[in-house]
Image (cartoon, rainbow, N blue to C red):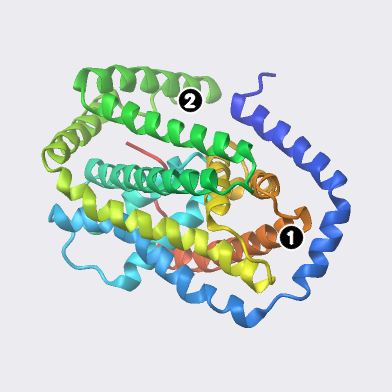
Amino acid sequence: MKVSLRTGISIATFVLIVVILFFSRRELHHAWGLVGHVDWWILLALVPVIMIGYLAAGEMTFSYLRQKGLITKISIWSQMRISLELNFVNHILPSGGVSGVSYMNWRLGRYGVSTGKATMAQGVRYISGFAAMVTLLIVAVFWVTIDGTVNRWIILMSSMLVTLMIVTIISSGFLFSSVTRMHNIAKKITRFCNSIVKWVTLGRVAELISARAATVFLDDMHDDYVALMREKGLLVKPYLWGLFFTATEIAIFWIVFWGLSTVVNPAPILIAYGLASLAGFIVVTPGGAGAYEAIMVAVLTIAGMQKSEAIAGILLARVIILLVTIVVGWILYQQVVMKHGKRPDTEI
């Protein structure tokens, strides 16, 4: 039986987490003691920060759609709840963001936005988020470089992360700038997916993705990309909201550490957050759970924080984030499904 690369990475990560937990059992015990003394009044500050974060996440998409005239009227509450629903789908159905794109396409379709334009809007969201993260990481690298107390490994890791993100953005632009390249890749992906479906269903389903539908979809995206490159100013607002969104994400961890009476340099938190976020695209667990926490704890420990303090702060922050995402997100998601009917499966 063949094991996919993603599955292999997930298994290896799970084993690594078990080993880390075993050797960190004393620190975990100490961390539990720290959590028992948290200042819950300080943690109340998380409520507005989390709400503003979801608003900023929504604006990364909707500010672009409004500038394009695709959506004219949508309330702040709707933007926040759609962002939370999207986060819930990405956590509950880990797929490197594919499930979220499918859900968002269906959700925006209720506002009259076509699938191709909805996907392009999400592409703008990811590009803006990446660009914002790169900007803040460059600031963080500069910050930790002049701070002589921070381990040099942190500088190396953050520099590699910045390079990876820049290469990703450039590669995406290279792909979408050519119809021929997009069509060639679409043909290969369509052929591969259909062959897998045909094999799994023993020939009962010969085609899941229509080559013609895929071509129309990609042509729509290419047209939007070309138009966007002519009007690069449309990216300014999503980019600024991306900076704001990333700042709220870091603020959540900073506030939790503050509640634990631990003062933390935001720069290492940002670097740890950037590296851990990559785990969500690779590890097949809700939101990269397990690997996410292990990476953040490791980076903060390398940066000079006590391991028990890092474990306490990261685990408490992640528990709060996941509770909001899964509990509140599930309620909002179910309301939408009951109102509009069962959402369609991933399709092009």
Q: Position of residue 279 (x, y in %)?
A: 58, 40
The residue under the point 75% across, 69% down is 35
The amino acid beneath tag 1 is Glu
- 154 over 296 or under it: above or below: above
The C terminus lies in which quarter of the figure? top left
Q: Disc number at residue 48?
A: none
* Residue farthest along the bottom direction in this orientation: 41
Q: Report whether residue 230 is seen.
A: yes
Q: Which one is earlier in the sequence, the residue at label 2 or at label 1?
A: 2
Q: Which residue is mark 2?
A: 197
Using the rendered view, name the quadrant where residue 138 is placed.
top left
The residue under the point 57% across, 79% down is 44
Q: Nearer the viewer, residue 205 or 194?
A: 194
The N terminus lies in which quarter of the figure? top right
Q: Are marks 2 and 1 in contact (CB under 8 Å)?
A: no
The amino acid beneath tag 2 is Val
Q: Nearer the viewer, residue 203 or 173?
A: 173
| Secondary-structure class at tag 2 | helix
Q: Which residue is mark 1?
A: 309
- 229 over 78 or under it: above or below: above
Q: How busy is the neighbourhood of tag 1: few (under 14 within 10 Å), some, or many (20 plus)?
A: many
Q: Nearer the viewer, residue 36 or 189?
A: 36
Q: Would residue 178 appear left or right of 283 to someone viewing this image? A: left
The residue under the point 47% across, 64% down is 334
Q: Position of residue 253 (x, y in %)?
A: 58, 62
Q: Position of residue 184 (x, y in %)?
A: 29, 16
Q: Report whether residue 108 is seen.
A: no
- Numbered disc in front, either 2 or 1: 1
Q: How busy is the neighbourhood of tag 2: few (under 14 within 10 Å), some, or many (20 plus)?
A: some
Q: Would residue 39 appear left or right of 93 to someone viewing this image? A: right
Using the rendered view, name the quadrant where residue 285 is placed.
top right
